[in-house]
Amino acid sequence: MKKKVAIVTGASGQDGAYLIKLLLKKNYKVVAALRRNSNINTSRLTSLGLEHVTSNFSKAEIELTEFTNCANLISKLKPSEFYNLAAQSFVKTSFDQPIYTTHVNSLGVLNCLESIRNFSPKTKFYQASTSEMYGNPINKIMNEKTEFAPISPYAVSKLYSYHMTKLYRQAYNLFCVNGILFNHESPFRGQEFVTQKIITSLVKIKKNKQKFLLLGNLDSYRDWGHAKDYVDAMWLMMQQKKPSDYVISTGKTYTIRDFVNRSSKYLKMNIAWKGSGLNEIGYDTRTNKEIIKINKQFYRPAEVNYLRGDPTKAKKELKWRPKYNLDSLIADMCDAALEKY
Ligand code: NAP
Ligand code: G4F
């Protein structure tokens, strides 16, 4: 039987690496689509043993903002499945770079959709949508029917693409799905995101390689899962008879402060808090040393205060079954950081 071909954009990122590994395990021919860079970051792929081109694994260049680039790749390969994971994915940066963020996250997605519509209408399309699109709704648990009210340039740019993906499904009868994924982390998480920043810093502090961990808002809530579980859900969405949109989340939510406390407990560090607001500090109860400080620069102009997703539809229709909870996610990330530093 002829192997399915999948293109994965954002292949150098966290989800890209795990998804490619999964697709290869499922016997696909996978094309890792990477953008040109002075120093292409393939460290995640390499650490999964994906360094060299094989009969099933190859690399291609894609710059999402360049229509001809997207169109040429899609018309040449006519893949069975196209997973669009590429994005300017850091919310804080989107406040400083709203135009660039919109070019990549909105028009870049339209470039892919137009390429599929014109040159390969049988290609199934996955769009990496996000829980950020909800903003701060009244509902305390969000599902596929919850209204979106984005409050960052990142979220607005992603909402545009969410709607375009839906539109191409409805207007042109293409197989297009949105995965509305809540925060998901792993040892591959970028250093700028709060979970990786906390764990890397605590490990370095424990090993006397760093003095302080500087954080912003400790009181926002996030629904954190493991990226390995979440790429399973992406694939499942693309195997359904009918395309639809799905929330992928754990259904549980914790504050940033909870995440610090649980990570420090796993690392056998005892942290207690005192003070409030910008003057709050976290200190080591054994040495009395101050190790966590709050810094204004890590606050955002507008904050999503509370995220908690309801994954009922995905569990029922996709039979999606995540394997990790918050503590096993933290253990996985801490073990990787302890080995690295
Ligand atoms: P990530 O680690 O930041 O990876 C983003 C990827 O996009 C990188 O490979 C990056 O390439 C690539 N990229 C950026 N701009 C590009 C452009 N103009 N052309 C081509 N490629 C470009 O993100 P992630 O955590 O894996 O997330 C994957 C996707 O899911 C993103 O779209 C993100 O917005 C979305 N999402 C993530 C989460 C989460 O919690 N992780 C939740 C919901 C949705 P370089 O390496 O060259 O920079
Ligand atoms: O880890 P974060 O930067 O992730 P955020 O903003 O929730 O976005 C991530 O999840 C989205 C899904 O909901 C994705 F769409 C998006 O691409 C990305 O993967 O921040 C989490 C929370 C925020 O409330 C932030 O204000 O942590 C708070 N925070 C507190 N101190 C901090 C810090 N965030 C960062 N990055 N750095 C800090 O020092």
Image (tube, rainbow, N blue to C red):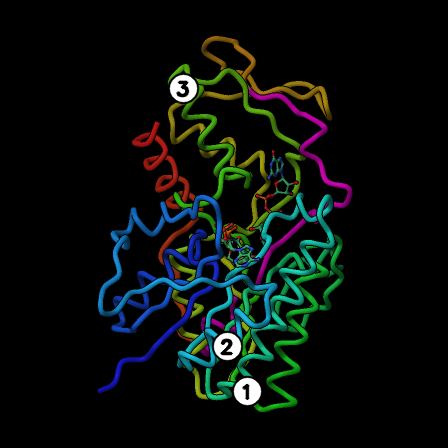
**Residue 330: mark:** none
Q: Is residue 304 magenta?
A: yes
Q: Of label 3 and label 2, which has the lower sequence position?
A: 2
In which quadrant of the rendered image does the C terminus lie?
A: top left
- Is 324 positioned to the left or the right of 171 in the image? left
How far apart are the two marked residues, 3 and 2, measured between alpha carbons?
44 Å
Residue 152 position in % (x across, y down):
73, 52
**Dot 2 surroundings within 10 Å: few (below 14), some, or many (20 or more)?**
many
Q: Look at the numbered disc 3 and say if its residue's Cβ is closer than 8 Å to ligand 2.
A: no
How far apart are the two marked residues, 3 and 1, measured between alpha carbons?
52 Å
Q: How many marks?
A: 3
Q: Of label 3 and label 1, which has the lower sequence position?
A: 1
Residue 277 position in % (x across, y down):
73, 26
- Give the residue displayed 44% in from the left and 69% down from the top: 234
- Is 339 positioned to the left or the right of 234 in the image? left
- Give the residue displayed 49% in from the left and 75% down from the top: 72
Q: Look at the numbered disc 2 and say if its residue's Cβ is closer than 8 Å to ligand 1.
A: no
In which quadrant of the rendered image does the N terminus lie?
A: bottom left
Q: Are marks 2 and 1 in contact (CB under 8 Å)?
A: yes
Which secondary structure, mark 1? Answer: loop
**Dot 1 surroundings within 10 Å: few (below 14), some, or many (20 or more)?**
many
Q: Nearer the viewer, mark 3 or mark 1?
A: 1
Q: Look at the numbered disc 1 and say if its residue's Cβ is closer than 8 Å to ligand 1.
A: no
Residue at image mark 1 = 174
Which secondary structure, mark 3? Answer: helix
**Residue 206: mark:** 3
Residue 338 position in % (x across, y down):
33, 30
Q: Of label 2 and label 1, which has the lower sequence position?
A: 2
